[in-house]
Image (tube, rainbow, N blue to C red):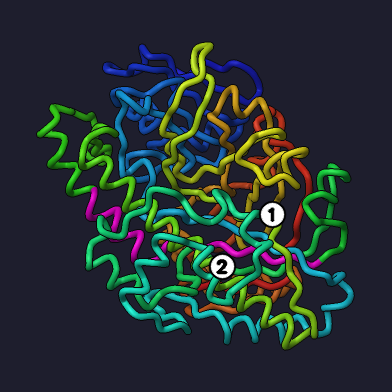
Amino acid sequence: MLKKIDNYRYIIPKEYKKGMLIEGMIYANDDMIKQIEKDQTKEQVANVATLPGLVGRSLAMPDAHQGYGFCIGGVAAADSEEGIVSAGGVGFDINCGVRLLASQFEHHEVTAKLQDLLNQLFRDIPCGTGKKGLLNIAKDELDNVLLNGAQWAVEHGFGKDADIAHIEDYGKIPNANPMFVSNRAKDRGHHQLGTLGSGNHFLEIQVVSEIYEEETARRFGLHKNQIVVLIHSGSRGLGHQVCTDYLDIMQDGMRKYGISVVDRQLASVPIKSKEGQDYLQAMAAAANFAFANRQMMTHWTREAFRRVLGNGDLNIVYDVCHNIAKYEDHEVDGSRKRVLVHRKGATRAFPKGHPALPEELREYGQPVLIPGSMGTCSYVLVGTEQAMKETFGSSCHGAGRSKSRTQAKKETTADELLKEMKSKNILVRGETRSGLTEEKPDAYKDVSQVVEVVHGAGIARKVAKLLPLAVMKG
């Protein structure tokens, strides 16, 4: 029972499922909605709409696909006084996110040394499941990482002061408290600072191939034929364990607070409860770990460029979270309201003039980074006022899976994938061959279609297109 509103929006009315308290809305075109309906995405959007204390609509971006409880690509906002918080509404990889670095090089200046650069990056940045970082820090120092995020890394020589303004929340989510992060989580994260990880995490050397908004791109520090680097990683084992711990706590908490859910994966507790506040403080700590993690990899990327090309001056365009829950002020039913916005596989997309943006970006709006799949293009967008009105200032986060990892591995061998990448003149280094096949290009939706939907719907605007030259995978 989907109601098509226009070429980019489909409403799930409250009558669709018993217990829905708000409507659902899916952003998609006619082709994509057919694909979205093949899995449980629509049901998950409707299920989220049954949770108590949500405001506005339960949303799914065009890259949405089935996830744990909430769909990946989902957005939901809860009243900060009466609503709930759900660990599944953030996901296991807390503050999985992307960071774009702009170099001083043109495409033709790096072509001859591209393989050397990729090899250097592969040596300098550990990747793969369970890989340890290059930095050994004392266990008690880890608490300072969890408190201060990217700011900790910069203070310890892994970056420059100017980096901080170009990170969401200035690289440090407030209210973090390491006391609410379990020892098991800390043990898992202790040696993983500055590591890429596995799965869909990557580091990619790209070239700016198209500019759609010249002035905005210039303000972002981007121009055609420029070499850039996109880093996609998160909070590693630490964030995964925080989510696991609090899913159990929330399961018990639902009985305590008399909350019933249509799917146990939607385990939730009141925001104002002790369990809810404990989770938000632990989640913020894990998010800060992820900010520090990407900051460390930025430092080593700069070092690799300096060693191979003689210039490591790469500026951060922006760094955005994909999996997070944050307090924000939004217009709801004609009045300003404090809400807790859950974004799970979704990107904040604040417009020009927003006070959360650094002064140098406030006149243009927030960069929104949309990576494609391995071997396909990526995009830089900018946030809009329409997003603030409709999606709690949110947009898509990538291409979105269309095939499971298992299915992808069955369909393609590593040799076939590497041959395909070679035919596109894309260099690839991966920690494992099976890890590469899981991430083959057609395991994901067409990122250009995804971007056209959010652009057409007005919840973000296209600024630049990036093409891959060399890919490093965990």
In the shown orientation, is residue 221 left or right of residue 4?
right
To which residue does mark 1 refer?
378
Q: Can see residue 262?
A: yes
Mark 2: few/some/many CA within 10 Å (<14, 14-19, 20+): many
Is residue 372 at all visible to an observer of this figure? no
Name which of mark 1 and mark 2 comes first in the sequence.
2
Height in image: 432 above or below 368? below
Report helix, strand or loop for mark 2: helix
Q: Is mark 1 on a helix, strand or loop?
A: strand
Which quadrant of the structure image shows residue 94? bottom left
Q: Which amino acid does label 2 sit on?
A: Gln
Which residues lie in the magenta part? 227-246
Find residue 419 and report its horizontal and vertical position in percent: 66, 75
Up-down: is 427 above or below 339?
below
Question: Residue at the spot x=28%, y=47% of the render?
Answer: 279
Q: Which residue lies furthest to the left in this view?
A: 256
- Where's residue 473, x and y in %? 55, 72
Q: Nearer the viewer, mark 1 or mark 2?
A: 2
Residue 30 position within the rendered picture, expressed as x and y whole percent measured from the top left: 61, 28
Name the residue rendered at 65%, 31% in the picture: 459
As drawn, the label of residue 303 is: none
Which quarter of the figure has residue 104? Answer: bottom right
Q: Residue at x 39, y 17 (%)?
A: 22
Give the distance between the C-alpha atoms of the residues marked 1 and 2, in whole angstroms.
21 Å
Do labels 1 and 2 touch, CB within 8 Å?
no
Q: Residue 295 carries which label?
A: 2
